[in-house]
Image: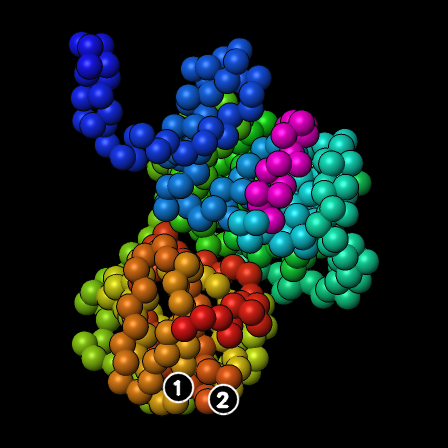
Amino acid sequence: MNRACATAFILVLATPVAAQQKRPSVAPKAMQEVAPQLATYTDDVLFGDVWVRSQLSPRDRSMVTLTVLIGTGKSAQLAGHLNRALDNGVTPAEVSGLVTQLAFYTGWPNAVSALAVIAPEFTKRKIDTAALRAAVSAAALAPEQPATARDSNPAMAKGAPKFEALTANVIYGDLWRRTDLTPRDRSLVTIIALAANGDEAQLASHMGRSAAYGLTRADLVEALTHLAFYAGWPKANSAIRLAIADQGKPAEPVVSADAAPPLTVTPPRQDPSRGPAEHFTGQVTVTSPFKASGGSRLGGATVSFAKGARTNWHTHPTGQLLVVTTGRGWVQAAGEPVRVVGPGDIVWTAPGVRHWHGATATSAMTHVAASESREGTSVTWMEPVSAAQYTGPR
């Protein structure tokens, strides 16, 4: 063996297996040939690091990416990212809702141009667009939320009455109450669209309301970091400065510890209410809700699930503790099998982990749930748990 061959052989032995078996490049061939360093950044930084960061789910990253591509008229890469989004859990109805939201915030031409790409991809995937149209026609508006409640602007009403009427009645009275997107997703899409287009004048106000919709400051910063690769560093830099500025951060309520009672007892089955259909599947009853005082951010309730009932997928910014009191239930974290729980079992879900919980198909279940709020929110609701997911592997 000559010296060159021996040296090469030693280098191969010294190289870690992972490096020898580097995953295939996702960079386009033209990029690899014309801009090889860009191809390296694409493989190692964008898809090898940013896209796999756990601080934001792949689904949310797809929502951010679609928003930037549609909202800035960059439809050349839309087909590939649309299919990635559908594979990451974004539903066709959510794609439809996203395009509609962006028509108002980035203009009709961007939305219409995007549909020319989306429609053929829906056809290839055999997505039933007739069902989408029927779902929109039958959908009821969600109750108006404090975050979207908007007082009339006298100056605007006098100077531009039609615009003011459209803003009040169509944007906030209808669009923001549509159920094809969750309030959190609608807020995320709007903030990303404004950031991608450099519309800083309205960006701060939408960021200020985002916590009421379930978006944490950490969610926003991570989403805007992702945006940097699709809208450019200057746009992300400006938006992140707003996100971390004091004027855009909702203040935690200040409560005097002296005014708080030293001990509170909440009787069982107090103040029963039906679990809202937009957050639960099946019959769910919430009783004995509690919220700590004296400056504590702890809160929770007793939740009872009938057979087959369960929560939507959701996350908690500071985690959640469940104590099962009666019956049998199922719990699942994203990417893990469904697990069975019973009386006395304690379930801890770490901060930011996407999960669901509920009764089994044959037994009711009751648990006490407790979690802390962060920036005014204790839970971020997502899409319903499908029948296939509910009865998945154990």
Q: Residue at x 28, y 80 (%)?
A: 345
Considering only vertical position in the picture, is 231 above or below 218? above
Side (left or right) of 10 relative to 288: left
Residue pictured at 42% horizontal, 21% vertical: 40
Q: Quadrant of the C terminus?
A: bottom left
Q: What segment is highlighted magenta in the picture?
A: 72-86
Q: How many badges with numbers are in the image?
A: 2
Q: Is residue 394 left or right of residue 59?
A: left
Q: In which quadrant of the rendered view does residue 72 lie? A: top right
Q: Give the vertical position of 131 relative to 243 (above or below).
A: below
Query: Is residue 78 found inside the magenta-colored segment of the image?
Result: yes
Q: Is residue 239 visible?
A: no
Q: What secondary structure do most residues of the magenta stretch adopt?
A: helix
Viewer-closest of 163 and 379 = 379
Q: Residue at x 46, y 15 (%)?
A: 36
- Provide residue 184's location: percent of width, then percent of height: 52, 53
Give the residue type at disc 2: Thr
> Which residue is label 2 attached to?
362
Amino acid type, label 1 = Arg
Q: Residues within 10 Å of mark 2 (few under 14, many from 20)?
A: few
Residue 122 visible? The answer is yes
**Residue under numbered circle 1:** 328
> Does the stretch in magenta take in 21?
no
Determine contact: label 1, label 2, CB under 8 Å.
yes
Instruction: Please name whichever residue, 174 or 76, is drawn nearer the observer in this view of the structure.
Output: 76
Q: Give the x, y percent position of residue 197.
A: 59, 27
